[in-house]
Amino acid sequence: MIFKSSTRVLTVHHRSVWQWVSATTRMLCSKPNQRQTELMARSLPKRMPLPGVQHIVVVSSGKGGVGKTTTAVNLAVTLSQHGKSVGLLDGDIFGPSVPRMMNVSEEPLVDEQNRMVPLLNYGVKCLSIGLLVDSGPVVWRGPLVMSAIQRLLKGALWGPLDILIVDTPPGTGDVHLSLSQNVPIDGVVLISSPQAAALDITKKGAQMYRMLQVPLIGLVENMSHVVCDKCSNRIELAENVIDMYVKELSIDVLARVPIEKDVMKCSDAGTPVCLKFPNSQLAKAYSSIATKVIQFLAIKQKP
């Protein structure tokens, strides 16, 4: 009897939880009325362009561990090689890795207006929360994270810049919302490996930016294949499932980036692989991505 009673109680509790989830989902998905929209707008920060920054491009993955920061770093450096003045903002508050990959470690200086001066290396202006806090973990709640993003964005002397690349953390949380609410984003470069598990999460990130009315530049397929360094034979690592996703999202594949053993060594050493090995397949892939980003921004800028 006790077992049956416990089972019945658990079943009732289980149903009540799902009823609450269903009701909450309907509430969140329902379109707000005019008064609700006005009230929400009052609490949002003003979306204002950064002084001296012409374009802002976000690098996003949704899924972690797919080479997003590596792409952001090499894209920023390659854009600089293409003659653009470039900045790189590390928006990953909890796991900043741009300082290591860009070989910067000094705390940024502050000018007379209390604005941080980004560090400069490889022709790219860099700023990260990893330069401002100790080496310990960042254990913050959402409001602190959003305040940090606003400080890194609007409390820094970024200009003059042609393009500011923002490396975002995995997921679809506070950082992405804070970015889209504070500054106008010109486009998003999506990063994913060819696995369906990674593409599913990247698709959610793409849908989030579509909801926020941020245009998608395209998708970079990381770790798509391996090229043998002895016979130059190309070995595909996954079935060609990415074409189905880009077709569904109505975007293009910007590049299919192979796995190369030098990537890890260069990232750990703080030297972007596009500089260390300018004739590699990786460097050519990043050059292709940079060219397509420049073309996208040029078309978007036209009236």
Image (cartoon, rainbow, N blue to C red):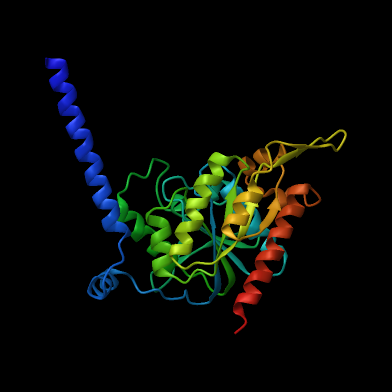
Could you tell me which residue is drawn at 40 percent across and 69 percent down? 182
> How many marks are shown on the rendered structure?
0
Depth check: give the residue in front, 60 or 105.
60
Name the spot of residue 221 as percent of width and height, x first: 65, 48
Image-quadrant location for residue 178: bottom left
Name the spot of residue 72 as percent of width and height, x first: 59, 54
The residue sitting at the bottom extreme is 303
Q: Is residue 72 above or below residue 264?
A: below
Depth check: give the residue in front, 22 or 148.
22
Could you tell me which residue is drawn at 31 percent across and 69 percent down? 44
Residue 84 appears in view: no
Residue 280 appears in view: yes
The quadrant in which the N terminus is found is: top left
Q: Is residue 198 above or below residue 157?
A: above
Name the spot of residue 111 as percent of width and height, x first: 43, 70
Could you tell me which residue is drawn at 34 percent across and 60 percent down? 147
Name the spot of residue 271 as percent of width and height, x first: 66, 48
The quadrant in which the C terminus is found is: bottom right
Image-quadrant location for residue 144: bottom left
Could you tell me which residue is drawn at 71 percent across and 69 percent down? 83
Q: Is residue 262 above or below residue 300?
A: above
